[in-house]
Image: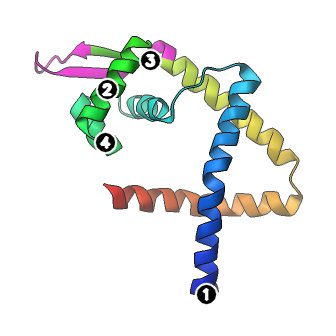
Amino acid sequence: MCDHRTMHSSAIELARQLGPLRRSLLRATREAADLPDLPDSHVEVMRALVDKPSMSPGVLAAHLNLARSTVSNLIKAMVDAGLVERSISSNDLRGATLTASTKALRLLAEYDAVSSQVLSDALDELTVDSRRALSAAIPALADITEILARRSS
């Protein structure tokens, strides 16, 4: 059983490792397949629109826990980049419905496939014990993600 000091130390180290891990994986993924440098916020919007197609900007803002003005600016840039399609809502002609474009779906699929391969290649270089420890930690990481998402909503 871990004491409070050990848990605090683990939390500090996990927080320190997550950002560099994410950035390193993203950089290696882009380099492996010559993929575009998409901002994290664009990827979050695309993933949200894949998970829940045809959201209004307001619903998307609430879903991402972002200000409506922030989402409005993101959507404008993403429509201009061909990543999001905006259409008039069938229920309310004043409202808009957002969907991920075919280009966004293709990019997400390519990023996911390449990043999985890049990560798999890196995992192959770990010791058996490190791979086991990582596999054992995956459910806890998913739990932490869920807890933090619940707290921020």
Disc 1 and disc 4: Cα gap in Å? 36 Å
What residue sits 43% from the left and 12% below the top? 82
Q: Residues within 10 Å of mark 2 (few under 14, many from 20)?
A: few
Whether label 2 touches label 1, CB < 8 Å: no
Disc 2 and disc 4: Cα gap in Å? 11 Å
Q: Earlier in the sequence, mark 1 or mark 4?
A: 1
Residue 119's mark?
A: none
Q: Earlier in the sequence, mark 3 or mark 1?
A: 1
Disc 3 and disc 2: Cα gap in Å? 13 Å
The front one of 48 and 75 is 75
Q: Which residue is mark 1?
A: 3
In what element is the residue under mark 1? Answer: loop
- Image position, residue 114 (x, y; %): 70, 29
- Image position, residue 84 (x, y; %): 39, 18
In what element is the residue under mark 2? Answer: helix
Which amino acid lies under the numbered mark 4 shown in the image of this protein? Leu
What residue sits 21% from the left and 20% below the top? 96
In what element is the residue under mark 3? Answer: loop
- Image position, residue 70 (x, y; %): 30, 34
Q: Which contiguous range is marked in magenta?
A: 87-103
Q: Earlier in the sequence, mark 3 or mark 4?
A: 4
Q: Which residue is mark 2?
A: 73
Which amino acid lies under the numbered mark 2 shown in the image of this protein? Asn
Marks 1, 4: nearer the viewer = 4
> From this viewpoint, is residue 115 visible?
yes
Residue 66's mark?
A: 4
Residue 83's mark?
A: 3
Which amino acid lies under the numbered mark 3 shown in the image of this protein? Leu
Q: Residues within 10 Å of mark 3 (few under 14, many from 20)?
A: many
The front one of 87 and 74 is 74
Whether label 3 touches label 2, CB < 8 Å: no
Which amino acid lies under the numbered mark 1 shown in the image of this protein? Asp
